[in-house]
Amino acid sequence: MQRRFILKFAAALGAASLISTLAHADDNAIKVGVTGGPHAQVMEVVKQVAAKNGLKITVVEFSDYVQPNAALAAGDLDANSYQHQPYLDAQVKDRGYKLIKVADTVTFPMGIYSKKLKSLSELGNGARIAVPNDPTNGGRALLLLQKQGLLKLRADAGLKATPLDIVDNPKKLKIVELDAAQIPRSLADVDAAAINTNFAMEAGLKPKSDAIAIEDPHGPYANIIAIRAADKDKPWVGKLVAAYHSPEVKQFIEGKYAGAVIAAW
């Protein structure tokens, strides 16, 4: 009996030790979801920096904007890095996710481009300006036009403003709503266009040199790191943020993207 008790006690100790080891490993090994392109490229540098401080990051790449939040909410990821706050807010509202922001990452500033003008001051009366036709990016474009003094929106229009929210349009600008991905191909057909940086880059446009106006990189559209609200006090969260906000990562962003992607911290 005594021998059996000792064996059971030893087995229990071994199991407890294993659980402790696994829990400790979980605190130092995480999965982070990203979308392809700059988000994935930057996270690979973050991964290298984090490893120096004992945090192992597995980067999981997605090809759409819906799955990274679904995977995070389901517990298949520990964090994700691919979206801005307005998008996360919409996802939380629509899907009930208990996800929160823990840090700003990078900004892909929306720019205004033209094949006909060198400055917005050259816009004539009745000029045609293309903007994305989805609520988030369409409102973003209109806010950029307002920032440039070209029009005025209702005070309560918010981040999802539409052309119906325009209350002052001195030059009688014609707002042409198009699919965001199609706008670069339609640039020759309008006087100017508000284009998301990812689509601008795909079309060979360089935000820093080709845009005739560009967003403030520290506005509401800075991208973020999101986690589950229940994990906000986990030790790895601080390590992940510190690695992302490191000088090495900032230097990589500035050197690789030449102003098309901007560190937002």
Image (spheres, rainbow, N blue to C red):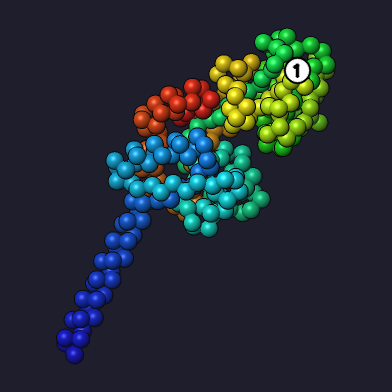
Residue 166 seen from this side: no
At which x and y percent is residue 96?
61, 54
Disc 1 packing (10 Å; few <14; some 14–19; many ≥20): many
In the rendered view, does 34 fall on the left or right side of 193?
Answer: left
- For the point 29% across and 40% down, which residue is it? 52
- For the point 48% across and 39% down, which residue is it? 40
9 relative to 115, above or below? below
In the rendered view, does 118 fall on the left or right side of 57?
Answer: right
Residue 162 seen from this side: yes
At which x and y percent is residue 221?
58, 32
Q: Secondary structure at mark 1?
A: loop
- For the point 64% across and 53% down, which residue is it? 95
At which x and y percent is residue 4?
20, 86
At which x and y percent is residue 136?
68, 36
- For the point 41% across and 49% down, which residue is it? 58
Q: Please tell me in which quadrant of the rendered image residue 197 appears.
A: top right
Name of the residue lying farthest toward the bottom: 1
Residue tagged 1:
191
Quadrant containing the N terminus in the rendered view = bottom left
Name of the residue lying farthest toward the left: 3
Q: Please tell me in which quadrant of the rendered image residue 158 appears.
A: top right
The amino acid marked with disc number 1 is Asp
116 relative to 69, above or below? above
In the rendered view, does 57 fall on the left or right side of 257?
Answer: left
125 relative to 102, above or below? above
